Image (cartoon, rainbow, N blue to C red):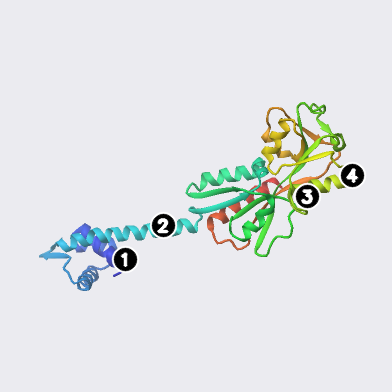
């Protein structure tokens, strides 16, 4: 049996008239009659009672009709499910990200737009340290990683692109003597505790800060390791130190925190998207296309 036989039978059972059923199906009446008789022969039961020019369902036909309709319904659902998955309208997307990514509007707005246009795609967000995110893409723990540059060489089979760039700014407690200044010099923070991430050499914001401090010949008197942006800003608000963060950190403003431009610093921090080169999931490819569109809008 096949779904064409089911469709021929169900249509005939709905019409209880071979001529009308054949017209609905777009086939000749004799051909439809042959298909129905072949189905009955295959099943070994009579599905229709035939009297003069009228037909009616037998008890076996009634039983078969319910299951045939269910089979056609499930076949249609299966086809629709396949089409929706192929269009990226269903599925799962796992995103690994560093905390500072949520301060970047191109990323947040892309997520919001994708959520609105693809409500049936399940999105899972995994907050991770930058040092783990590239390997997470390669090992398929996540589908997309959103992390801070710079990056080491991207592994074979993966690609990356810059989603946003932000200058570095100083984040000070409001109790700091320079909190009212619109701009300061890096050297003005020499006596403060610097809150900074513990990123490996050559990777992410930690490397950017170390390179910046080395070029400026600046060594903070004290440091404290903090690997998450909102925690960093919270500790600044508590007066436990100062921080150098991407300018997008301003969106995470807390009471007791001031943001100042750095006069003598040209360094920028890049937000980078890492993904597999040959992505199989249509949903992941659709989100990546939206992120690339956001990147082009920023350029």
Mark 1 surroundings: few (<14), some (14-19) or many (≥20) residues within 10 A: few
In screen coordinates, is 152 left or right of 25? right
- Percent across and percent down for residue 172 are 77, 32
Rounded to the nearest whole Å, what is the CA distance between mark 3 and mark 2? 48 Å
Q: Are marks 1 and 2 in contact (CB under 8 Å)?
A: no
Q: Tell me which label, 4 or 3, sits earlier in the chain.
A: 3
Residue 115 x %, y %: 53, 45
* Residue appearing at x 22%, y 69% in the figure: 36
Query: What SS does tag 4 mark?
Result: loop
User: Residue 233's quadrant in the figure?
Assistant: top right
Q: Position of residue 121 (x, y in %)?
A: 50, 50
Marks 4/3: CA–CA distance:
15 Å
Above or below residue 102? Residue 136 is: below
Q: What residue is pinned by disc 4?
A: 217
Q: Secondary structure at mark 3?
A: helix
Q: Are dots 3 and 2 in contact, CB under 8 Å?
A: no
229 above or below 2?
Answer: above
Please tell me how crowded label 4 is: few (under 14), some (14-19), or many (20+) other residues with Cα within 10 Å.
Answer: few
Q: Which residue is mark 1?
A: 3
Which of the pair 1/259 is nearer the observer?
A: 259
* Mark 2 or 4: the one toward you: 4
Disc 2: CA contacts within 10 A as few (<14), some (14-19) or many (>=20): few
- Residue under circle 2? 80
């Amino acid at each position: 049996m096949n779904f064409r036989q089911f469709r021929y039978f169900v249509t005939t059972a709905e019409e209880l008239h071979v001529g009308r059923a054949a017209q609905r199906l777009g086939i000749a009446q004799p051909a439809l009659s042959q298909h129905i008789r072949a189905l009955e022969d295959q099943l070994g039961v009579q599905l229709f009672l035939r009297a003069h020019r009228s037909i009616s369902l037998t008890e076996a036909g009634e039983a078969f009709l319910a299951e045939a309709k269910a089979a056609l319904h499930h076949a249609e659902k299966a086809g629709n499910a396949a089409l929706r998955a192929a269009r990226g309208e269903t599925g799962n997307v796992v995103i690994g990200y560093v905390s500072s990514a949520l301060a970047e509007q191109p990323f947040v707005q892309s997520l919001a737009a994708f959520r609105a246009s693809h409500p049936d795609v399940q999105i899972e967000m995994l907050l991770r340290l930058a040092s783990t995110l590239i390997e997470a893409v390669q090992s398929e723990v996540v589908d997309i990683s959103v992390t801070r540059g710079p990056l080491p060489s991207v592994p074979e089979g993966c690609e990356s692109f810059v989603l946003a760039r932000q200058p570095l700014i100083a984040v000070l407690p409001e109790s700091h003597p320079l909190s009212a200044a619109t701009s300061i010099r890096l050297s003005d923070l020499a006596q403060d505790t610097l809150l900074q991430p513990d990123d490996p050499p050559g990777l992410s914001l930690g490397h950017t800060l170390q390179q910046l401090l080395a070029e400026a010949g600046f060594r903070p008197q004290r440091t404290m390791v903090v690997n998450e942006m909102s925690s960093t800003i919270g500790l600044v608000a508590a007066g436990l130190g100062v921080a150098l963060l991407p300018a997008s950190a301003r969106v995470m403003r807390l009471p007791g925190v001031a943001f100042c431009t750095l006069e003598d610093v040209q360094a920028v921090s890049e937000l980078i998207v890492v993904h597999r080169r040959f992505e199989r999931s249509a949903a992941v490819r659709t989100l990546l296309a939206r992120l690339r569109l956001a990147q082009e809008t920023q350029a």
